[in-house]
Image (cartoon, rainbow, N blue to C red):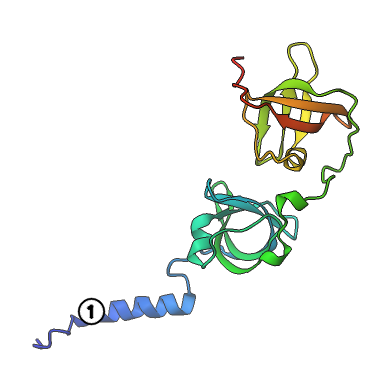
């Protein structure tokens, strides 16, 4: 047995070398096996929530982008509309970005610069500014419904309409002011304003 303090048993050394060579040749030491390259644009990203989504160019399902993935590759955050290329892996709940290959923020859109009509349907308001309560809203799906009370038709509200008026999200029970008109699926919000100092409805 050697007295060299740096020596190690031959078996463990050869095993370690083999593992290192395998990692180098396969490049899969920490990488999932099913990585694919995805190019697309940022749908939205919320630093406070720690994640956002990428819309792939090829029409495949949205890809989850976590803030830790961004920061590991030297980016602090991204803006809606930015171009991005990532390596993504399939997870239990869908595709998730594993590594950022490139990021181009020059195409990013500031919320105030978003075009006025991104909802496919242009709605002309036929009502005055009325009080309504948020019945349901899903930010990931990009829409929700408002209610003016029992016995009245729900008012469809799109995320893009909210953004035009500086609103990032709505919560069920929250009171808002809305102007609405006839859309392709019934009543549709054309303008939404937050009620200053309003408390969530009790029903």
- In the image, 45 versus 31, the foreground residue is 45
Point out residue 32 in the picture as x, y percentages from the top left corner: 50, 63
Residue receiving disc 1: 11
> Which residue is drawn at the image coordinates 74% and 25% (left, top)?
177
Residue 166 percent coordinates (x, y): 70, 41
Viewport quadrant of the N terminus: bottom left
The residue that appears at 71% across and 66% down in the rendered structure is: 106
Which of the pair 138/198 is nearer the observer?
198
Q: Residue furthest front?
A: 196
Up/down of 18 relative to 87, above or below: below
Towards the viewer: 173 or 39: 173
Q: Quadrant of residue 201?
A: top right
Q: Tell me if 198 is positioned left or right of 188 in this view.
A: left
What is the quadrant of residue 79 in the picture?
bottom right
Residue at (37%, 78%) from the top-left corner? 20
Residue at point 83%, 45% (across, down): 116
In the rendered view, tell whether residue 197 sits above or below residue 28.
Answer: above
x, y percentage for residue 145? 73, 27
| Label 1: element kind | helix
The 10 Å Cα crowd at callout 1, few under 14, some 14 to 19, many 20 or more, is few
Q: Is residue 175 left or right of residue 181?
A: left
Q: Quadrant of the C terminus?
A: top right
Residue 140 seen in render: yes
């Amino acid at each position: 047995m050697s007295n060299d303090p740096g020596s190690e048993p031959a078996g463990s050394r050869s095993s370690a070398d083999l593992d290192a060579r395998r990692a180098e040749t396969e490049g899969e030491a920490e990488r999932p096996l099913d990585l694919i390259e995805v190019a697309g644009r940022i749908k939205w990203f919320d630093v406070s929530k720690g994640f956002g989504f990428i819309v792939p160019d090829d029409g495949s399902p949205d890809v989850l982008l976590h803030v830790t993935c961004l920061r590991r590759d030297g980016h602090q955050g991204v803006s809606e509309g930015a171009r991005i290329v990532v390596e993504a892996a399939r997870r239990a709940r869908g595709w998730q970005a594993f590594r950022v290959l490139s990021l181009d923020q020059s195409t990013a859109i500031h919320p105030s610069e978003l075009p006025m009509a991104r909802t496919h349907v242009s709605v002309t308001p036929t009502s005055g500014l009325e009080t309504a309560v948020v019945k349901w809203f899903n930010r990931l799906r990009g829409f929700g419904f408002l209610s003016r009370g029992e016995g009245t038709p729900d008012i469809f509200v799109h995320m893009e309409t909210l953004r035009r008026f500086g609103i990032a999200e709505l919560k069920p029970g929250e009171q808002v002011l809305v102007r609405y008109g006839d859309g392709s699926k019934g009543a549709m919000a054309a303008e939404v304003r937050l009620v200053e100092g309003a408390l969530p409805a009790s029903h």
